[in-house]
Image (cartoon, rainbow, N blue to C red):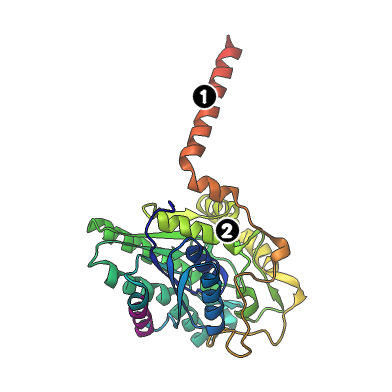
Amino acid sequence: MESSRSPRVVVVTGASGGIGRATARAVGARGDKVALLARGEEGLDAARREIERAGGTAVAIPTDVADHRAVESAASRAEEELGPIDVWVNDAFTSVFAKFTDIEPEEYRRVTDVTYHGYVNGTRTALRRMQPRNRGTIVQVGSALAYRGIPLQTAYCGAKHAIQGFNEALRVELLHEKSGIHVTMVQMPAVNTPQFSWVLSRLPRQAQPVPPIYQPEVAAKAVLFAADHPRRREYWVGGSTAATLAANAVAPGLLDRYLARTGFGSQQAQQPREPDQPVNLWEPADGSDGHDFGAHGIFDSRSTQRSPQLWASHHHGVVGGILLGMAAGAGLAARRISR
């Protein structure tokens, strides 16, 4: 986006770690004012300091997004301190790594309340402020798992599927109203975030993202692009996301069988799970010992900062021109050969 534009007010949920943390840093670095929402106060304060050191403006607001009253209060404070909200990014979530039969009903409900209802609460709160102004953007941070369920993550996959349907329905309503407010969704690949060290896990070995693994800055770049170009209904990040969604559309049954064979092992590292690993399902993971987990998880050595697919998705015109040029060149070559 042009450097001459006016600073925007951006709310990021889940801003204490992972994709939310990386997104908040990127937003603040380009001059926008950021409201940071999450439960973990250590992570929130660290994120605020990072943004302020970079010359940006941020306010940290401890918030449990599962509580709609808390989200409303946070939005009011954000507007009082920063101004009218221009962009709302929903990213906060929690999860459980376990087989479905090993997850207790209250745990399942908690994952759903945070990961799905948290997005609903954030979206409703944002719309209440954006609709009188008839402008604004809401970005839902999604996942390839919004389309393709995998084993050991039934609660998370169910919530992401729910967000997908909710967002599509809301988008159609806004289109019907010819609203100036836009909603878009960014489907993420496996990302090196702290979640694998803090979500409730009943796996025998350390939980891990399924390779290829991308750094959270790749995801943040996609979120910012979506916020700046929200008329497109959806963005896919990473070649693995594109390949998974394409395979699921063409041969979902074969993908079921493939994941049944590989999905349990590919989501676990070789080392055993630490028995005293923090759990953020009910309380923030940084609440007990004051530890800031940051944006990155423990898989830096196996993660990449690059995604050619992401570049291509941001430059459809260039890619289309290249493909047309290649097709034209192939046609000319074929004609010469035939002569």
Q: Hey, which quadrant is residue 196 in on the image? A: bottom right
168 above or below 276? above
Query: The magenta stretch spans which residues?
Result: 69-78
At a point 56% along the width and 72% down the height, the residue shown is 50
Task: Give the numbered dot on residue 218.
Answer: 2
Q: Is residue 180 left or right of residue 3?
A: left
Secondary structure, mark 1, is helix
Indicate which label's residue lies in the foreground, 1 or 2: 2
Kind of residue at disc 2: Val
Residue 333 seen anywhere in this rendered image of the structure = yes
Q: Hey, which quadrant is residue 302 in on the image? A: bottom right
Q: Position of residue 107 (x, y in %)?
A: 52, 85
Q: Is residue 306 magenta?
A: no
Q: Is residue 133 left or right of residue 328?
A: left
Please tell me which residue lies in front, 323 or 20: 20
Kind of residue at disc 1: Ala
Task: Find disc 1 in the rendering and name its residue.
Answer: 328
Name the N-terminal-most of marks 1 and 2.
2
Task: Give the numbered dot on residue 115.
Answer: none
The Cα–Cα distance between marks 1 and 2, rounded to whole angstroms, is 33 Å
Q: Position of residue 156 (x, y in %)?
A: 52, 72
318 above or below 75? above
Please tell me which residue lies in front, 310 or 211: 310
